[in-house]
Image: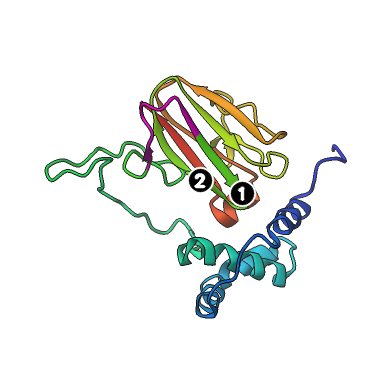
């Protein structure tokens, strides 16, 4: 085993530490609601070996930033179907196609026709995490790959044919020129995926 590689517990603690001090003040009522909504997720974080108070602090901050849905626990028991097309119409509904990591053609941000699309990632989000682009588009990922390596494939399996492989584990920015039509999922360390759904996909058309 490479001694330089961090254990999942150490990586969890490190990433939580990265979050410290990044969130601004929020109304007390919002924090109270987030503490209640995030209780189950706090326990899952604590089970990974991180102090419960650290889990609660960082999860509540994230909830305040992105809303109560950030604390939703997905046990795979249900699915949600949407029918919104890329462009609003009164007569047609776009075929969503395959859904991977919660991403399909109906959920994706439409960036077709753009030569460069930037996906930024911070603990514990990709933004935007689901996009559709034209063939030949450059997709640039920006963030700390040492803490959140980028892996191509559908969690938990790395796909050697993915345009996002081999995994990116160093640096702060990496470009991918996507030419193969289809849906190309990606994820980061499995612990983050399980806890926070830190994953996404790029659809090439």
In the picture as drawn, the residue positioned furthest to the front comes out as 25
For the stretch drawn in magenta, the main secondary structure is loop
The residue labelled by disc 1 is 122
**Residue at x 30%, y 39% (from the top left corner):** 96
From this view, report whether residue 172 is shown above or below residue 190: above
Q: Nearer the viewer, residue 54 or 117?
A: 117
10 Å crowding of disc 2: few (<14), some (14-19), many (20+)? some
List x then y, in percent, for residue 154: 52, 38
10 Å crowding of disc 1: few (<14), some (14-19), many (20+)? some
**Residue at x 67%, y 66% (from the top left corner):** 55
In the picture as drawn, the residue positioned furthest to the left comes out as 91
Label 2, label 1: how far apart the Cα atoms are: 9 Å
Q: Which mark is residue 30?
A: none
Q: Which residues are magenta?
A: 108-117
Q: Residue 160 colored magenta? A: no
Whether residue 12 is visible, yes or no, is yes
List x then y, in percent, for residue 191: 65, 51
Whether residue 155 is visible, yes or no, is no
Quarter location, residue 53: bottom right
**Residue at x 50%, y 75% (from the top left corner):** 30
Left or right of residue 92: residue 120: right
Left or right of residue 160: residue 97: left
Q: Nearer the viewer, residue 159 or 85?
A: 85
Look at the numbered discs 2 and 1 and tell me whether their residues touch, using CB distance below 8 Å: yes
From this view, report whether residue 68 is shown above or below residue 201: below
List x then y, in percent, for residue 130: 44, 41
Left or right of residue 103: residue 152: right
**Residue at x 42%, y 59% (from the top left corner):** 77
The residue labelled by disc 2 is 127
């Amino acid at each position: 085993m490479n001694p330089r590689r961090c254990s999942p517990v150490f990586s969890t603690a490190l990433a939580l530490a990265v979050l410290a001090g990044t969130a601004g003040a929020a109304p007390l009522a919002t924090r109270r609601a987030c503490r209640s909504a995030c209780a189950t997720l706090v326990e899952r974080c604590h089970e990974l070996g991180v102090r419960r108070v650290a889990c609660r602090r960082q999860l509540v901050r994230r909830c305040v930033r992105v809303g109560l849905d950030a604390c939703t626990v997905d046990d795979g028991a249900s699915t949600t179907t949407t029918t919104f097309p890329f462009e609003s119409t009164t007569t047609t509904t776009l075929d969503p196609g395959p859904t991977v990591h919660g991403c399909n053609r109906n959920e994706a941000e439409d960036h077709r026709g753009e030569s460069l699309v930037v996906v930024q990632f911070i603990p514990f989000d990709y933004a935007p995490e689901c996009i559709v682009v034209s063939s030949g588009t450059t997709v640039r990922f920006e963030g700390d790959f040492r803490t959140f390596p980028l892996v191509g494939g559908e969690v938990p399996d790395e796909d050697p044919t993915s345009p996002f492989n081999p995994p990116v584990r160093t640096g702060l920015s990496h470009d991918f020129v996507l030419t193969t039509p289809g849906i190309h999922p990606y994820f980061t360390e499995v612990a983050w995926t399980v806890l926070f759904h830190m994953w996404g996909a790029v659809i090439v058309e």
